[in-house]
Amino acid sequence: MGEIFKKGLGNRSFVIGGVVTIIFILIAGISLLWTPYPFDEMTIASKLKTPSGDHWLGTDHFGRDVFSMMMVGARNSIVVSLVAVSIGAGFGIPLGALAAARGGWVDEAVMRFNDFTFAFPALLSAVMITALAGPGAVNSIIAIGIFNVPVFARITRGAALPIWKREYIMAARVSGKGPVQISIEHVIPNIASVLIVQATIQFALAIIAEAGLSYLGLGTQPPNPSWGKMLSEAQTFMFLAPHLALFPGMAIALMVLGLNLLGDGLRDVLDPRLRRQR
Amino acid sequence: MAIFFLRRALTLFATLVATSIIVFLVLEVIPGDPAAVMLGVNAQADTLAALRAEMGLDLPATERYFNWTLGLLQGDMGNSYTYGVPVSELVAERVVVSLPLALMAIVLSTVIAIPVGVLAAARHNKPTDLGVMGVSQIAVAIPNFWFAILLILLFAVKLQWFSAGGFAGWENGFWGALKSLLLPAVALALPQAAILARVTRSSVLEIMGEDYIRTARAKGLGKSSALWRHGVRNALIPVITIMGLQFSFLLAGTIIIENVFYLPGLGRLIFQAIAQRDLIVVKDLIVLLAGTVVVVNFIVDMLYAVLDPRLRGGGHG
């Protein structure tokens, strides 16, 4: 672990991406304890103010402090994305490992299930769930989670197949271990680096998806702030207060950029064989 | 080839059936009484009974499923509850906005991304390449709906060259309608172009190390003619796959972007239907959109097999 970290410090993508990601996680964490103003405090008298010493990023149409809302928005965005990606990984990795371990019709069935799930972009699932149960952050989590299952299943299967041909797997088989035990003890630890890199990239995609869903009003609901919702509200006041449309978008782009860089850096650090041509 | 096609066609059929079953289960069976969901808690008993009869809810679920899917196959998507017209009419009205928008975005992103990707590969590790990689890294991170808002801020609010949203309608002149789709198409194309450019670049770089390029160079072909004559064609195979995989993102993007620009396309229709709890329209549109993703992936697979005969073996991966 220490060695990986040392190697990482020499990798520019890893360092920049890591720092940006940590800053956002810190901001989200701090918002649990402190924000400059309560995020839902409305002061209509000071609405649509431009950034100033009092309100670092200005105020919205209800006079709420934009910086405070963005801090809490970071938290919501990170929590939704993290849980969604965990669901994707939690179902996808075992499915992919199973397909690789059993082969034959099990493999075929898992892959066809994958193709099928792929037909439902997170947005379509979210639309269906909302039509059924009304909007909310849980919708985003389920919808983004469902879309992540086939991604992890595919990556796990692809990475696990060559591992199953290795000699130490043969040895484990001879010693009487079953496919499940071998998958858990030998296969998954050996493909962990690929999975970690993928999880980072999926996390970035989930941040964008969550923002999109809340922009459309399907995700996080008011008064809970979210970056996507803030952008859709800002659009209404674009002629009066264009700055409102800038900051939440910048936050999304910066966080996604940070995660993507971190993913690239991790790929180089964890598995030099995967290094892309530069 | 015939066996490969047949196998894929069977999978396509099975996937479409599975898709329709899931959508039917989620929107018609799980809610218990979809008519009650559509009308809300304050519904009058007789209105409820009328809607139940209209939706055929007294029939068993399996029979309703077959009626629905057989209807879909004949182009009969049922009647919208809120609009009171056939859903197929609504779709026909809206698809003339969504389809051109998606096509414009695909054309724009391809026209930008492929030359840029090839250029970056040709100038590997030089400032042009590093610039392309940097810009595309940032472009991938920008959500298309925020980019759309930025475009509106610049071109509609500041410069006032375009309207901030809405659709001029094809019947009021081709150019006006095209103009109202231009900013949305650009917003949709940007992240797609960034991803495509990166894939094109790495694909071309890989091809440039192949033996046949070296042979072409040894025959006296210059670097750029070897690249364009032999390299690019082969490098495009993975690019087509990515375009296929990107299609579901493009579709989701179209739905969001239509809402940003208030375009009366399928994406807006789906949201109006949700707001009005018109489950009939929601159900049809979801099957239509998910079905489109499945069919496009099938076509990409076929195209892939035509371009690269090695893939016709029938294996997967």
Image: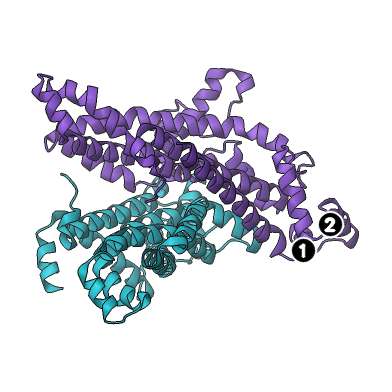
Chain colours: A cyan, B purple
Q: Is residue A46 visible?
A: no
Compared with B40, B200 (above or below) is above
Residue A212 image offset from top left, x and y in percent: 47, 52
Element assignment for label 2:
helix
Q: Check disc 2 and give the amino acid type.
A: Arg
Task: Judge the density around disc 2: few (<14), some (14-19), many (≥20) Cα neighbours within 10 Å.
Answer: some
Q: Is residue B194 visible?
A: yes
Give the Cα separation between the discs numbered 2 and 1.
8 Å
Q: Check disc 1 and give the amino acid type.
A: Asp
Could you say which is closer to the camera, residue A92 or residue A182?
Answer: A182
Q: Quick one: quadrant of the N terminus of chain B?
A: top left
Compared with B230, A245 (above or below) is below
Could you say which is closer to the camera, residue A270 or residue A251?
Answer: A270
Could you say which is closer to the camera, residue A103 or residue A266?
Answer: A103
* Earlier sequence position, callout 2 versus callout 1: 1
From the viewer's perspective, tell me whether residue A184 is left or right of residue A137.
left
The structure residue drawn at horizontal position 50% and vertical position 63%, both measured from the top left corner, is A42
Compared with B97, B171 (above or below) is above
Residue A114 image offset from top left, x and y in percent: 47, 56
Q: Look at mark 2 in the image and give the residue it sits on.
A: B52
Residue B104 image offset from top left, x and y in percent: 46, 29
Compared with A155, A36 (above or below) is below
Q: What's the chain of the residue with tag 1?
A: B
Task: Judge the density around disc 1: few (<14), some (14-19), many (≥20) Cα neighbours within 10 Å.
Answer: some
Q: Look at mark 1 in the image and give the residue it sits on.
A: B33
Element assignment for label 1:
loop
Q: Are the residues tagged 2 and 1 within 8 Å (C-beta)?
A: yes
Residue lying at the far bottom of the rendered structure = A176
From the viewer's perspective, tell me whether residue B138 is left or right of residue B96.
left
Residue lying at the far right of the rendered structure = B46
Residue B51 image offset from top left, x and y in percent: 84, 54
Q: What's the chain of the residue with tag 2?
A: B
